[in-house]
Amino acid sequence: MITMTTTETMKAVRIHKFGGPEVLQLENAPRPEPLAHQVLIRVHAAGVNPIDWKIREGKMGRIPLPTIMGSDFSGEIEALGPDVTEFRVGEMVFGSVADDSGSYAEYALAPVSQIVEKPANLEHVQAAAIPVPAMTAWQALFDHAKLRRGQKILIHAAAGGVGNFAVQFAKWKGAYVIGTASADSAQLVRNLGAHEVIDYRTTPFEDLVRDADIVFDTIGGETQERSWKALKKGGTLVSVVQPPDEKLAAARGARGIFMREDGTRNEELTQITNLIASGQIKVNVETVLPLSEARKAQNLSQTGHAHGKIILTVT
């Protein structure tokens, strides 16, 4: 458990019950104190992810309430927990928070295993857009699907927060990249490096793609079910939204993998950061809002039509 101070407070966006955006409350909350192997972060910017509104609605299990929303952040180290020697007070870092902390707040706790130094050429708004979506895409493509140069990959929702990193990583790796997106997002996806873009509203992707080595599913439902037709025999479907159907996978002679992002692999976040700092990978931030507009931010995320990352700034 996190030890809370009794006198110091901070502004934070919390929920006291599950429900719609109206349950998000910007209020005073106890400022936490770091435990061993943790640091206290003064948050400058917080990322908004689809999992945030799913947690708010109770779709990710009944977590203890009240809880502060948000996972990824960029900010400044305010205090060190016992035995922390890897970082120093005042250092600019970014990453993801501890399990029982939240980034929609003036202060948050983060394990040292989940943060890296922020490059000087990255603004806090850009850095906060990286951890969850970039790590999700990286781990899906390389840790689970084992994407190799020359393979063909179909990426669903290629203009979204996770999808746009996946397109760039796949192109960087030397794969042939096909993305699904709406017509108004097609040019964005091409600019990210996709060789082909399929308008999912007008064209069944499975009619055009039949020999993909990998399908990266960020949508689930009937999109995932139809995706088996796009895979070649022995291909891999990796999903971040729901477990693939084992019978459908077997019928296709394919592998189906369900994964969740592992924020503790900060060596991977370091690799990603180096690619971004060197200009090989771009960070696509679509919307920047103040912390007080967390409801609006989650509403936009929940539409599923965000072209890139939504960021909350904390002052």
Image (cartoon, helix red, strand yellow):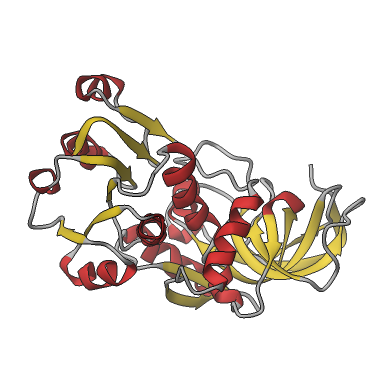
In-image side of 167 versus 232 (left or right): right
148 left or right of 139 in image: left
- The percent coordinates of residue 299 (x first, y second) are 39, 63
Q: Quadrant of the C terminus?
A: bottom right
Task: State left or right for residue 96 relative to residue 52.
Answer: right
Could you tell me residue 290's position as x and y percent?
Answer: 54, 77
Above or below 221: residue 125:
below
Q: Is residue 122 above or below residue 72?
A: below
**Residue most extreme to the front:** 150
**Residue placed at 82% from the left, 73% from the top?**
90
- Tag count: 0
The answer to whether residue 14 is visible is no
Q: Residue at the spot x=44%, y=59% of the render? A: 21
Quadrant where the N terminus is found in the figure: top right
Q: Quadrant of residue 40?
A: bottom right
For residue 121, which quarter of the picture? bottom right
Residue located at (39% from left, 55% from top): 166
Q: Position of residue 242 (x, y in %)?
A: 37, 35
Q: Can residue 211 be seen by looking at this rendering? A: yes
- 191 or 43: nearer the viewer: 191
User: Looking at the picture, does residue 236 appear above or below residue 207?
Assistant: above
Residue at image position (76%, 53%) is: 112
Residue 24 in the image: state x and y as whole percent.
Answer: 53, 60
Q: Is residue 186 above or below residue 166?
A: below
Q: Residue furthest right?
A: 83
